[in-house]
Amino acid sequence: MEEIMELIRHWVLLYCICAIIVCAIWGTVIALIAIHRGYEDQQTKWFWMGAFFGVIALAVIIGLPRRIKAAETPEPLREEPKGLSKGTWKCPCGTVNAGYISTCQCGRRKLDVLAEQRKAEWGE
């Protein structure tokens, strides 16, 4: 009888150790996903959520919107290019158009021209 109790104790101990390892792995994975999605200020919270709730925490963190830092946010394409007077945009054909004109006389659209200028500035 004592042998059986000793065997049960060993299995329970082994089960507890394995459960702790699995919880630590889940917590670490969920915390890393949270950091990657922009929630680095809440990584400890997400570690414990992952450790205790596992798949549910994974579903929640994946369902949350990404946080974008201000440094990662590109300038809007509608911003006027530098070097022109306020409220104007210059078409590649050489015409300087007023800001309210959305299509140049050559047929190019203002948003397309500004997008091309931004790509040239950013080196894309």
Image: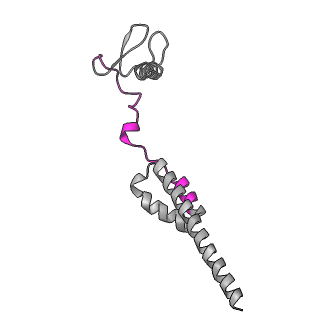
Give residue 26's position: percent from left, percent from top.
Answer: 56, 61
| Image quadrant where residue 15 sits | bottom right
**Please, which colouring scheme is shown?**
one colour
Along the viewing direction, whichever of 100 and 96 lies nearer the viewer: 96
Q: Residue at x 48, y 61 (%)?
A: 47
- Left-right relation of 111 to 57: left
Range covered by the magenta-colored residues: 57-85
Taking the spot 43% from the left edge, 52% from the top edge, the residue there is 39
Q: Nearer the viewer, residue 7 or 91?
A: 7
The secondary structure that most of the magenta stretch takes on is loop
Q: Residue at x 60, y 62 (%)?
A: 55
| Residue 108 in view here | yes
Indicate the position of residue 76 as horizontal and vertical percent values.
39, 31
Outermost left residue: 85
| Quarter-of-image position of residue 73 | top left
Of all residues shown, which one is farthest toward the bottom?
A: 1
